[in-house]
Amino acid sequence: MLKTLNSRIRPYSTLQVSGDKVQRIISQIPIPKPQNAISSKEIVPSRTILEKAFSQARSQKKLCISSTNFLALVDQYIEATQEPESASEKLAQWHQNVLEQFDNNLEDIALVSKLLDTISRNKVMSLALYKVAADKGSHEGAFRLAKKLLEEGKRESDAFSIITYLANNSHPDSMIYKAQAYMVSKQYHIRAHGIELLKQAAESSPQASFMLGEAYRKTSVIGQDMEEAKRWHVRAAKGGVPASYFVLGNLLSKGLGTKDKKPDLPGALKMFELGAAAGHAESQYNAGMCYLLGTGTTKNVDMAVDYLVLAAAQKFPVALLNLGKLFLEGAEVQRRVRRGRNYLNIAKECTKGVGDGFIGQQADMVLEKYAHLKDERECVIL
């Protein structure tokens, strides 16, 4: 997909686009609306979930709209899209209502759009909010609209014009988008240009720092440099990218990027635990296995199970598999037959039709081996 994107975006790489032209393009894009009738629950699954999302947003900044007023906008949006004949007029009024309710705060509109995107089954209202923000000059709204056009294969020239303008004006996600396309090129100088774009984006984007870390960690992009990989991943981790803790842990466990080139197992565990605390499933799994095997620390089965349960709660297949084995074998923990079978069955379900089927095969082997054991009565909450 990215290779195709590379060939599509390159003709626009030197394009000079004015802000006036971009705003004309955006003004011609209609407010997104659902293809079929939708309910409010498709946009906001529950008020509780919305309240939690708003609470999380308020931990970053004070929002200028209440959840109650936002739910009213959801209802207005749904009503405006129910009758095709009057949809355009009603959506234009809704557009104005959004600006009034948000007190013309484009940053808040973009922030709530992003939150809505994470909790909605139907993303159309999130995109409609981005359109409102883009009409008033929001770079984030414009970027999201351009991406949607590209995903739908519509107005490609306009979409790339928008992204090029935003990238030229230091919009981090737009620079990342272009960089991703460049870095799969077969030509080194184009990949190098992608790296430079990422470095510019990394001034304000931890995700760009993560991508730089991965680019230097792998040999296929710009040439392997473990010191640079470590430096960028440290920066990304400090910026709030949990996956970088996982990568740093793996580097330390293999002696890559360490001063003496020797594995630093306690240091690796520390990184995994930091990633685990930030909710990263692979870090939770690795921390659990470190405690289970006594790698870089004293063996502690209780701690191991605690971390593996966290990863299993996120449906991480290998954590589910290992917990199932632990509880059915009963060698390291008290045997819990029903719980063990539950974990193994979920592992099978999570990996059904995915990959080579190894997890499912292993789960079946363990289930068959302990098929003679009787279930005990037990409530299992995963």
Image: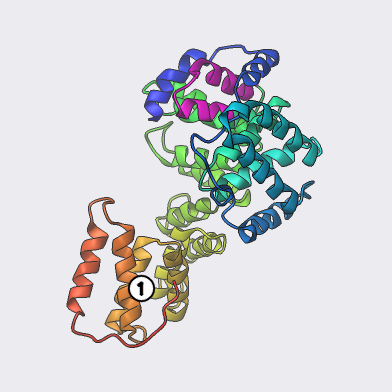
Residue occupying the point 45% across, 66% down? 313
Percent coordinates x, y for residue 219 in the rendering:
38, 36
Residue under label 1, please give it.
323
Q: Position of residue 375 (x, y in %)?
A: 29, 85
308 displayed left or right of 86: left
Q: Residue 50, how many percent across, how many down?
A: 64, 55
Which residue is rendered at x = 69% and y = 25% of the image? 135
The residue lying toward the viewer, choosing from 225 and 82, is: 82
The structure residue drawn at horizontal position 69% and vertical position 43%, both measured from the top left corner, is 73
Q: Is residue 166 magenta?
A: yes
Is residue 28 found inside the magenta-colored segment of the image? no
The N terminus is located in which quarter?
top left
Q: Is residue 260 above or below residue 218?
A: below
Q: Nearer the viewer, residue 42 or 261?
A: 42
Residue 295: name its quadrant. bottom left
Q: Which residues are magenta?
A: 145-168
Place residue 358 in its image quadrant: bottom left
The image shows residue 32, relative to residue 345, as above or below, that is above
Q: Inspect the image, locate mark 1, and give the three-letter code of the amino acid beneath it.
A: Leu
**Callout 1 crowding tier (Cα within 10 Å): few <14, some 14–19, many ≥20:** many
Q: Residue shown at 66%/13% (left/top)?
A: 21
Q: Is residue 11 left or right of residue 74?
A: left
Q: Secondary structure at mark 1?
A: helix
Residue 186 in percent (x, y) is at 36, 23
**What is the count of numbered marks?**
1
Vertical order, 146 against 273 (above or below): above
The answer to whether residue 196 is visible is no
Please name the predominant secondary structure of the magenta segment in the image.
helix
